[in-house]
Amino acid sequence: MATIADRLVLLQKEKGLQKKDIAKAAGVSLMGYYRYEQGIRQPSASVIVALADFFGVSADYLLGRSDKP
């Protein structure tokens, strides 16, 4: 099962985005976003929703609960 860190890295690469732009869209610092990608910290529910909306995927996909974006 994929982790949120795995999905964030995958989505960033697929969409050709920069970490700073994703962090800004999610309302977190660049370092905070980096920690999510590294699996050091887990995002709050509101950040998960913001990231899912930004990437155009479901929260379940982002969390690794579904393989269907």
Image (spheres, grey):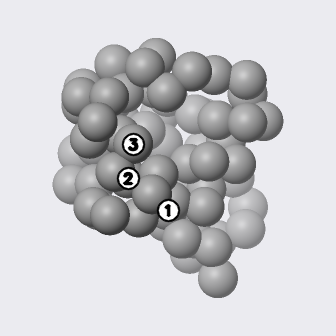
Residue found at x 47% / y 51%: 37
Q: Quadrant of residue 2?
A: bottom right
Q: Are marks 3 and 2 in contact (CB under 8 Å)?
A: yes
Q: CA distance from mark 3 to mark 2?
A: 5 Å
Determine the secondary structure under disc 2: helix
Q: Are marks 1 and 2 in contact (CB under 8 Å)?
A: yes
Give amino acid for label 2. Answer: Tyr
Give the Cα separation between the discs numbered 3 and 1: 12 Å
Q: Mark 2 sits on what residue?
A: 36
Among the two numbered marks 1 and 2 on one chain, the one whose residue lies closer to the N terminus: 1
Q: Nearer the viewer, residue 6 or 26?
A: 6
Count residues near mark 2 (Cα–Cα under 10 Å), then give few for <14, some for 14-19, many for 20+.
some
Tell me, for residue 59, which label it has, or none: none
Q: Is residue 31 visible?
A: yes
Quick check: can you spot residue 59? no
Disc 3 is placed on an element classified as helix
Residue 18 position (above or below residue 14): above
Indicate the amino acid at tag 3: Tyr
Q: Residue furthest right?
A: 14
Left or right of 28 in this view: 24? right
> Number of callouts in the render?
3
**Position in image of residue 39 (x %, y %):** 41, 64
Q: Quadrant of residue 6?
A: bottom right
- Residue at 32%, 28% in the rendered image: 30
To which residue does mark 1 refer? Answer: 4
Residue drawn at x 64%, y 35% is 12
Asked whether, in this view, residue 13 is left or right of residue 19, the answer is: right
Q: Position of residue 54 (x, y in %)?
A: 49, 28
Residue under circle 3?
A: 34
Badge 1, how many Cα within 10 Å: few under 14, some, many 20+?
Answer: many
Q: Nearer the viewer, residue 26 or 53?
A: 26
Please name which of the two marks, 3 or 1, marks the residue nearer to the observer: 3
